[in-house]
């Protein structure tokens, strides 16, 4: 549908030593975006790899519904 949402990078929060972060590990805060996601659509997550090339992950509607259900607990 052409809509692009951006999640905040929360990767630094997962390391006990901020100076020793791992370049191949990432975490993003999807919580603020969940209400905006239409659960009946296939979504694509686009992530940049350590080399800078994009990686696209398909997120099926069932997973979006699960995320939204968990966010309400």
Image (cartoon, grey):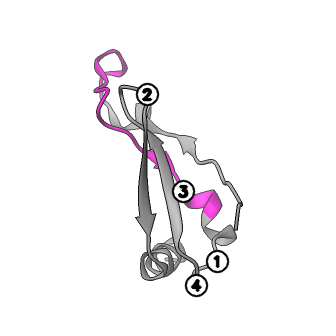
Q: Which mark is residue 57?
A: none
67 lies left or right of 14:
right
The number of discs equals 4
Question: Decide: marks 1, 4 in contact (CB < 8 A)?
Answer: yes
Q: Quadrant of residue 41?
A: bottom right
Question: Decide: marks 3, 1 in contact (CB < 8 A)?
Answer: no
- Asked if residue 62 is positioned above or below residue 32 in the image, the reply reads below
- The residue that disc 2 covers is 52
37 lies left or right of 47:
right
C-alpha span from label 1 to label 4: 6 Å
Label 1: element kind: loop
C-alpha span from label 2 to label 1: 29 Å
Return the disc, 4 or 3, that comes first in the chain's sequence.
3
Q: Position of residue 3 (x, y in %)?
A: 71, 60
Return the disc, 2 or 1, that comes first in the chain's sequence.
1
C-alpha span from label 3 to label 2: 21 Å
Label 4: element kind: loop
Q: Position of residue 31 (x, y in %)?
A: 56, 60
Looking at the rendered image, the disc whose residue lies closer to the viewer, 2 or 4, is 2
Front in this rendered view, residue 31 or 2? 2
Does the magenta-highlighted stretch encompass residue 58?
no
- The residue that disc 4 covers is 40
Which contiguous range is marked in magenta? 16-33
Q: Which mark is residue 38?
A: 1
Return the disc, 3 or 1, that comes first in the chain's sequence.
3
Q: Position of residue 9 (x, y in %)?
A: 52, 38
Residue at 66% across, 54% down: 5
23 lies left or right of 71:
left
- The residue that disc 3 covers is 30
């Amino acid at each position: 549908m052409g809509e692009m949402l951006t999640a905040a990078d929360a990767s630094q929060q997962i390391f006990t030593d901020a100076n020793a972060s791992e370049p191949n590990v990432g975490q993003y805060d999807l919580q603020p975006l969940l209400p905006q996601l239409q659960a009946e659509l296939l979504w694509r997550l686009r992530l940049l790899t350590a080399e800078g090339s994009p990686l696209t992950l398909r997120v099926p509607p069932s997973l979006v519904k699960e995320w939204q259900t968990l966010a309400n607990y």
